[in-house]
Image (cartoon, grey):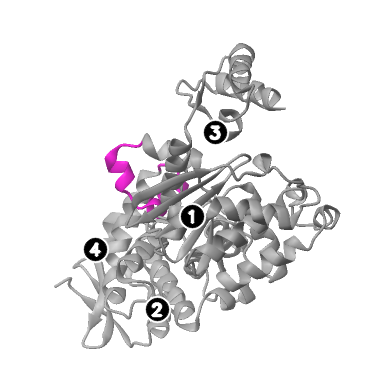
Amino acid sequence: LALEALKRFSMLIASMGISQVDAIATAAVRDATDGPDFIARVKEACGLTVRVISGEDEARYSAEGVLAGAPDADGVVGDLGGSSLELVRMRQKALGAQESWQLGPLSLPVQLDPLDVDAAGRHVGAILDRSAILRAGDTGRSFFAVGGAWRSLAKVDMALHGYPLPVLHNYRIPRPQALETCNFLLGQSRKSLERMKIGVSKRAETLPYAALLLREVLSRGSFDRVVLSAFGVREGLLLEGLSPGNREMDPLVAGAIAMLGGDQRAIAFAEELFAWVNPPFANLPQLFNEQRGVVIRSVACLLSDIGALLHPDDRAKLAFELVLRAPYPAASHAERVYLARVIARRYCADASGFEPDMVNRLLDPERIARADALGAALRLGADLSGRSAALLRASKLGYEHGVLVLRLAEGSQALASEYIRKRLTQLGQALGAPVDVRAGLG
């Protein structure tokens, strides 16, 4: 099966003209007695030179991948593969201690299907008791779970608790809830898991073991929550190849720019729009931490034209869904919903009809109101300027003695049509402020 897949990938690589190929093998090949023979067969059949990485490199790449999707990660990364479990301590964007343990399901010396829970628990416990990372007592608040088995566990958790946003990346499970789900899975048979209509049938054999392992990890670490990461070894490998400048970019901002497909006009307008909307919002109470609030506003501006090519009748709804489910990294689920609400409001006067149950579950009323206000500001800026950065510079938006004032440069007063004054009034209502249009930028 592996050779069949690799042959297909080698054909795709050749057809796309890709010149830089980095093929790596992890613990399953590293620990197999016929690993070297397999590598030779891959070279002969596919023309790929496979690099077998060490357990230490596997742990480092996995942790780097988690940082690519969660730059402020503080805790321990646990990457569960077929043969091994890599543990890495992370703090302040830096990697700490690293460990690699033979705890993948393929390495388990006891019955897997059905799982011999007692024997597996003794085996796992004896190994994890040797972990200096878990024993240290300073594990941070989050355990970042990487790997297909734990992603399937998260799908089960979502189903059990009726979670409304089926996005696995950055899905957070409070510790008590995670333990509850682990215990639930340990009571299920393979057939019962295969009958679940949530896409976990391929992991049905190993899910109970993944649950047992997670339970044992949580019992030894002072974690408050489990955080799912869709990023791991592959993304860590990619991150290592980036230039220092690219690595310093906020990944959520970079993801939003990527969604624009390199449209320089849209990026230039977004930069101007960010400077334009900032004054009325910069001094409001922070709903995210201060630095994060600036990033979220910046990303909202970048995505403000995301619906330009969508049909006007469905633009707000489709833009909401696109922003909500886009594969960008480094956004919590609350931030995803917040941005989706902002962009929906940018395209319509009332965004309250879009996934109200999800919005009310993941955002508090203050964040909903702020999202609507920011969306109204983006709408005003886009309509006022016709999405022209030059025309937007001919105006300013800000508070003057408690009044939200739109100022227009001399000769630009024609921009303030009745339509635009209506947009300004709507923004004032969202911010709870009287509004006025005045001449001169001052």
Please name the residue that numbered disc 4 is placed on: 394
Question: Against 106, is 286 above or below?
Answer: below
Name the side, left or right, on which 412 lies relative to 13.
Answer: left
Query: Which quarter of the figure is the C terminus placed in?
Result: bottom left
Q: Label 1 crowding class (10 Å Cα cut-off): few <14, some 14-19, many 20+? A: many
Mark 1 residue element: loop
Query: How packed is label 2: few (under 14 Cα within 10 Å), some, or many (20 or more)?
Result: many
Q: CA distance from mark 4 to mark 2?
A: 19 Å
Residue 340 % position (x, y): 52, 65
Residue displayed at 65% across by 55% down: 122
Residue under pointer 2: 427
87 relative to 278, above or below: above
Residue type for callout 4: Ala
Between label 4 and label 1, give the one nearer the viewer. 1
Please state if 180 lies on the left or on the right of 332 as rendered: right
Asked which secondary structure carries label 4, the reply is loop
Q: CA distance from mark 2 to mark 3?
A: 54 Å
Give me the residue at 61% from left, 62% from top.
215
Amino acid, disc 2: Leu
Q: Which mark is residue 26?
A: 3
Q: Counting residues from the N terminus, which is met first, the one under dot 1 or under dot 2?
A: 1
* Residue range corresponding to the magenta coloring: 242-262
Q: Nearer the viewer, residue 422 or 3?
A: 3
Residue 386 can be seen in this image: no
Dot 4, crowdedness within 10 Å: few (<14), some or many (≥20)?
some
Question: Which circle, 4 or 2, is nearer the viewer?
Answer: 2
